[in-house]
Image (tube, rainbow, N blue to C red):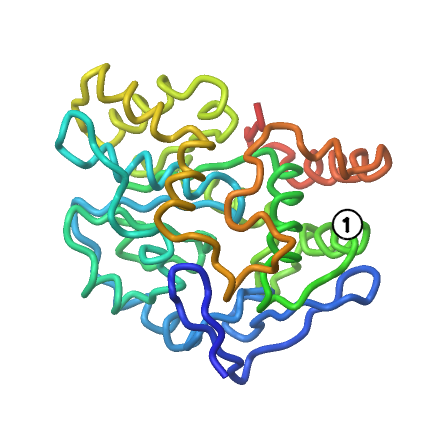
Amino acid sequence: MDTPTPGNVQLRHPTGITKVQDGEGDTMVAYNDVGFIDMPPISNLEEKMAQMSDFKCRSDDVFVCSFPKSGTHLVWTITSMLVDSSQYPSYPERALDDALLEFEGPSALTSNLPPPRVMASHLGVVKMPPSVLSSAKIVVVYRNPKDAYVSFYHQLRGLKWREYSGTWSGFFELMMQRNEQHLGGPESFISWVDHTKGWWEFAKKNSNVTFVRYEDLVSDPIPTIKRISDFLDLQREAATLEHIAMKCKFDSMKKARDDKDGWDQENWKDTSAGIYRKGKIGDWKNLLTVAQNERFDSLIKRRFSQTGFSLT
């Protein structure tokens, strides 16, 4: 039986559905056979992934790419408002869920989104359509991975269709395993290292990609919003940038989502905060132990050695 995801995307349990074990033996539902592991169980995922090479990118297309729970909603909303030509743009009429490449599929995005199209994806660079990599403007948003993983953990536990109730310690061990070198095997949807490192190396060689930091958008948003605007060759007045910054504060976006859609009982457990939880900087300190923090820092230092990438 199909299970709906946020944004009315329909999920099912096709052939590639499996139960992935965390470090303590608790399981979550995932899709594992499209050259990627740990993917959400998206309806017709294999078919959608097969369409990637046929996706036709327009010259004015914009993609927001990110690891899950890294500020995707925030940067997609900011970007959508920037491409709106009005001085004081409103929130986009469509939900982000309707613009996610791997959820909607290339065919649906091509048919349903009017130009200028602002789309999003959690896919790594190796899985993106070639025409996107060559022709689109790509904004990659990254976040302190410790905060991203804490938020991801709460999301996995909160979504009914993930069927996960594991502890933080169990999830941490799974996350550490997935972030180790994958030795030529399939990339994991929950490997922050593979996702971020892949996009970083691509961005160093291609001028149609820019990186923005979630923490900068929370602490001092206007300079980064202006940088996105300049990257997209848009001329936006200071008043417009200030308006977007105000509209895109976490509490404002959460209220707008709640007012528009209400509580999504089909997808979220009653105990979950839903898609918008906290959006705070440094929330990882409430879950990671000293030993876990040291292990993770060591892994990041080793995997990003000599790349030039910095979290700050």
In the foreground, 120 or 128? 120
In the foreground, 59 or 235? 235
Q: Which quadrant would residue 193 be assigned to in this image?
A: top right
Q: In which quarter of the image is the C terminus?
A: top right
User: Who's the residue at 39% across and 67% down the image?
Assistant: 9
Element on which disc 1 rests: helix
Of all residues shown, which one is farthest toward the right?
291
In the foreground, 311 or 170? 170
306 left or right of 4? Answer: right
Q: In this view, does 242 lie above or below 36?
A: above
User: Who's the residue at 81% across and 50% down the image?
Assistant: 169
Residue 296 screen position, x and y as percent: 75, 39
Q: What amino acid is found at the position of numbered circle 1 in the picture? A: Trp
Q: Circle 1 is placed at which residue position?
A: 168
User: Who's the residue at 40% across and 64% down the image?
Assistant: 103
Of all residues shown, which one is farthest toward the top?
238
Q: Which quadrant would residue 293 be assigned to in this image?
A: top right
Tell how many labels: 1
